[in-house]
Amino acid sequence: MSKNLKQGMMVVTASMLATLSLSALAATPDSFTPPLSSATSWFDAGKLAVADAKKLQKNIRRAKNVIFFVGDGMGVSTVTATRILQGQQPDIIGTGNGATASSGEENFLSFEKFPYLAHSKTYSVNQQTPDSAPTMTAMVTGIKTNGDELSVNQTMTHGTTVADCNRTDLAANSLPTILERAEDAGLSTGVVSTARITHATPAANYSHTTNRDWEADSNQPAAGCVIPDIARQLIEFKHGDGIDVVFGGGRTYFLPNTVKDPEYPTVLGKRKDGRNLTDDWVKAHSGATFITDTAGFSQINPASASHVLGLFEPSHMQYEADRNTTPAGEPSLADLTDKSIRILKNNKKGFYLHVEAGRIDHGHHAGNAYRALTDAIALSDAVKKAQATLAELKLDKDTLIVVSADHSHVFTIAGYPQRGNNILGKVIAFDNPQAGYVQAVDKAPYTTLSYANGGGYNVGADGDAAYPTNTGRTVNMTDVDTTAKNFHQQALVPTGTGGSETHAGEDVAIYATGPYAYLFHGTQENLVIYHVMATALGFK
């Protein structure tokens, strides 16, 4: 195969090419000047890495706290592209992360500096390429299960019928989660997500169900199901004194279908049972608080706050790229993480906190790398903020931090671009940059980032919008700004109108620091994450 992949690209018709312009480069930067590096600097960097590794010592002190970060859909290719994007454009979402505009490939995300790393196998009991429900179940219970099921064992079949939602054996086949065990042990607990808080990844911490989609009673096949919907399970959580901090999206799943959303008056709740679960939350806990926006969030006093429920959107929270455009505003994932730690640390016994960057996954499903990667940058910022907050509170040496993903995506980085090539841009060859964009055999340029399947090329849709499938090489992108946040990368296999790109089946990474982090090594089953967290907390 040639260096510019000319033999590997799909060909468009002559009539199509006749209508396309090959005139000019896009207006956005095509590349960034990489830092000057000498042979000595590379060699010295290697020596320093080995010297640092020699200093590592097993930390076997019992962890007082555990923070488990999940980048939903954050496969290795996503981590790599995010690292480069953050380094090339450090102010793309105003993170102030300290990377220089020329660091690019040499940059490190915050969690990539952790001392311990492992590969995590993500398959489920009945899936080669999994969804988030069984993978998160494995990570928080230590046991694998079937696709679309949350924290129940593999003997439970996927629920779709009235009979399924009226099964009476759910409790007997439910799997204890690390959050439930923490509550039973007297620790404080928190769940944070930029997705709906009833979505699969956060919900696996506190709910048990045979269908991840049963988020409200209106999503179930019948009224009054024996198996409670996921929102109900959160509010009726019976371990310890209840979950202490809940931040995320999904307000409508807690509100009756006769009640207007507080931020969007044309949006109604989804509940058919007439219950306002946010009221039930406040009534269930002494001093409990329910908030919906940044104003309410800023008024929370961490020193005295108890049982805080924050639901900032009717459905998922906004992408990081769009967060500051909403009417009432939304806290960043870093802010949510910081305040959660400050509330939970009031319990002298310690805490378990789960933090999910849920919208990385949604950006990828939309074939929109910009939003997926900027949400991954937001996760890196949240991990960095957590480390700073723990250090300030003198909790860093007693806290195990684990960062991982539930699965990957069919997201690729390819094309032999030069070092410093804009990761969101079109390929400029490393061996002939003066020639401009590399052309495929169809005489058109191509981007470094692409997807193996999905909806394909689009320049006008936001991260969630459905649009006609436009897969393959249908448009010459010479004049297209592929770095724009509404650009959707080209894809090969069509998945239908507004088609959703799919998960991928390769291993993801586990990054860890703190007590017992050294137990992560080599290639391990994803369920090992639970066992390391439980070991660190001293659970039998």
Image (spheres, helix red, strand yellow):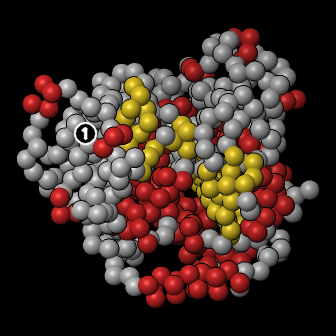
Q: In front here: 126 or 313?
A: 126
Residue 17 visible in the current orientation: yes
Counting from the top left corner in percent of width and height, residue 312 is at 46, 46
Three-letter amino acid code of the residue under disc 1: Val
User: With respect to residue 89, does 322 lie above or below?
Assistant: above
| Label 1: element kind | loop
The residue depicted at 20 percent of the width and 42 percent of the height is 444
The residue depicted at 57 percent of the width and 21 percent of the height is 219
Residue 195 visible in the current orientation: no
**Disc 1 packing (10 Å; few <14; some 14–19; many ≥20):** some
Viewed as shown, does residue 420 lie left or right of 437? right
Q: On the image, numbered disc 1 is attached to which residue?
A: 441
Q: In front here: 337 or 296?
A: 337
Q: Quadrant of residue 69?
A: bottom right
Q: In front here: 314 or 385?
A: 385
Q: Quadrant of residue 208?
A: top right
Viewport quadrant of the C terminus: bottom right
Viewed as shown, does residue 153 lie left or right of 273? right
The residue depicted at 50 percent of the width and 57 percent of the height is 79
